[in-house]
Image: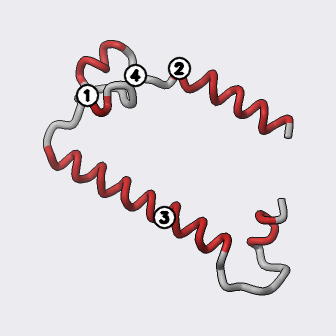
Amino acid sequence: MKKIKLGFFVFLLWAGYVQACDACKLQQPKITQDLTHGTGPESNWDWVIVSSIGIITLGTLFFSFKFLVIPGEKNRKHIKNTILDF
């Protein structure tokens, strides 16, 4: 539990550090000003690529939790129980 609290505290401190600097904020469109460094998207295809990757990531996250909690496996020695019994 101590490690979790320490990790959360470090995350809160680190969150302000990883935001984009003022010079990069001027180069970014309004939606990504505080998130990334460097130049902004150069064409509409960049937005399509980023949106596709976001959808794939959210789908992967959904199915990983779904199959972790309800895999259809009834054996008590299944690997999911090492995580769920934590």
* Residue pointed to by mark 1: 30
Q: CA distance from mark 3 to mark 2?
A: 28 Å
* Residue pointed to by mark 2: 17
Secondary element at tag 2: helix
The image quarter containing residue 4 is top right
Question: Reading the chain from its start, which is encountered first: label 3 or label 1?
Answer: 1
Residue type beneath disc 4: Ala
Instruction: State how many labels appear.
Output: 4
Secondary element at tag 4: loop
Secondary element at tag 1: helix
* Residue pointed to by mark 4: 20
| Residue at x 23%, y 46% (from the top left corner) | 47
Mark 4 and 3 residues: CB-CB less than 8 Å, in contact?
no
26 left or right of 42 in image: right
Observer-side mark, 1 or 4, equals 1
Question: Reading the chain from its start, which is encountered first: label 2 or label 1?
Answer: 2
